[in-house]
Structure formats: C-alpha cells, structure tokens
Amino acid sequence: MPASIAGAVDLSALAARHEQAAAPQSAAPAEGAPGVVITITDADLPTLVELSSRVPVLVAIVAEWSEPSQQLLPLLERLVVAQRGKLVLAKVEGDRNPQITQAFQAQSVPTVAAVIGGRPAPLFTGALPEDQLQDVLAQVLEFAAQQGVTGAVPTGDGPEADGEEGEAAEPAAPPVPPLHQEAYDAIDAGDFETAIAAFEKAIAQNPRDSDAVAGLAQVRLLARLQGRSADEIRAAAAAEPDDTEAQMLVADLDLSGGHVEDAFLRLLDLVGSRFGDEKQQLRLRLLDLFEIVGVDDPRVNAARRRLTTLLY
C-alpha cells in the first residue's frame, strides 16, 4: 500500500495541538462495538489523527444519497468489527464536512483512506466486493505494523473492556517544543510564512532537529501550492515544458497527492538536462521532497542514488 502524504502537514499540525485528546466526542459507536465504528465531523479531525497514532483508522467519506456508499458501509463495518479493535472505521458525511473531504482529496463518494500515525494513505473509491475489502484491510494492518502502529481499542465484549487485561497504558506524550508548537498553530491558521519562520528558527538553534527540518520542507510545499488549482499548475507546465519552476510545481502537486515516484522521476529527468543554478534548484527541491516522504523510505533511497549519479 503506497503511503500518501496528502494533507499530512495539516493533519499533524492539528494533532499536535490535541495530543492528550480522547476519541472524538461526536463518535457514534456501532451496536456491540463501541469505539470501533464511529461517525466523525470536521471538528473531530484532530482527535482522529491522535487516535491513528495508536490504531490504524479507516476513513470512509460517504453520502446518504449515494447508493455505492450504502452498499459499502454495512460490509465495511462488519469486516472492521471482526478485527476486534485492531482497526477503527470513521464514517464521514462528505457533503457536510468539507475540511475532511478536502484533506483527503475526495473527488467522489464513497472514498476510503487510511490514517496511520497521522499520515493519510488513499485506498479506493466506490464499492468493493468482500474479498477485495478483506485484502485492503490486511494491507492496512500490515503497513501499520511496519510503522509501529499496533494498538487496539476496547470492543466492549472482552476482558480488555473491563481493564482485566490488555496493553499497558501508553506514557504521556512529551511536550511539543515551543517553536514547533508556534509552527503548528500557524499552519492551523493557514499562516505558512510564520510557520516557516518558526521552523527555521528551531533549525538555527538545533541543526539536528530532524522534525523541524521535515516540517519546514512540508510547510514550504504547502506555501508553494497555496491558492493554486491543480488544473492551473498542470496547464502551466504543459504550456512551458522548459520552465523549470513550472515543472517543479507539478512535482509538488504530485507529491501532495501521493504520487511519490512521479514527482521524483519528473525532477530527476530534469536534473539530467539542466545546468548551473537550475540544476542546483532541482537538487534542493528534491532534498525537500525526500524529507517530506521520509529519508528511510525505499523510494527516497532509490531516488537519492540516481540523483548522486546525475550530479557527479
């Protein structure tokens, strides 16, 4: 399952402001499975992200008028409940919750994504048969385990619900550094310039602050895309194929939508045909994108090796 970073900065910023929050207050658990199947709204997005740091969350963006949504939900609920707390299904009425719909870039309903450790990954749109849904859930659990997200929520029908057994309570999260919190608050308010300044100050104080380095790269990407539509960005790049800045912006757009390999390939191909300042700009942009995806990601390692070959 390809991990998408679409909207990851926005979600993580909200989560950082609510690290100690409980499950969404508006959650409406399914009968017999409290906390396993919930209904959320835009207001619950921060606590949804916090929950995803402990257990993988499926987000189903649906609509009452959508027949595929009504076909999918009962089957998806049954399969999630069968996982006995290892997964949470969060149902969202897309028409009434534009923030979540935008964060997950849902173009149609139903749209289903996973949130694991605060980062969303697109899964599928439309209704799927049961065998395919089972495969999707298995992939989500496997990927979550790779990321260390292996907790569970009480299902209300076992000893865990009574506190007799189960995992020990997780230690309280460490406080967010003040400059990081300033950046998160600014991101939440849409003030990317202030967020950039806060992260830059944090890095100046501690050049080894990897969280600030990654945060700075993410906010820079958001700032570059702010106020621009996908159609506008792609049309400009198609009209000016030799415009390095226009091509870099398309790579930003691809990465923001989870198309990691496409973004890397576009910029690496340009590195091989550019010289001087343009080549340096492309190198720096790639380094930023590497930070966003994660320096340990195998796709980053492969792209970094090719970049080294092209530069030297």
Image (cartoon, rainbow, N blue to C red):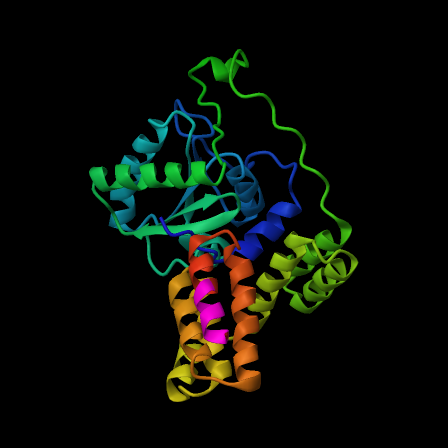
Residue ID at (49%, 30%): 151
* Percent x, y of residue 144: 44, 39
Residue 303 on image: x %, y %: 44, 64
Residue placed farthest to the right in the image? Answer: 205
Q: Residue at x 42, y 30 (%)?
A: 86
Residue 114 is inside the magenta segment: no
User: Residue placed farthest to the front in the image?
Assistant: 312
307 to 199, vertically: above or below: below
Residue 310 magenta-highlighted: yes
**Left or right side of 83 for 134:** left
Asked whether residue 165 is in view, the answer is: yes
Dominant SS type (magenta): helix
Residue occupying image coordinates x 33% and y 54%: 109
Relative to 278, is 107 above or below? above
In the rendered view, tell whether residue 135 sits above or below residue 299: above
Range shown magenta? 305-311
The x and y percentages for residue 246 are 47, 81
- Relative side of 198 to 263, left or right: right
In terms of image quadrants, where is residue 114?
top left
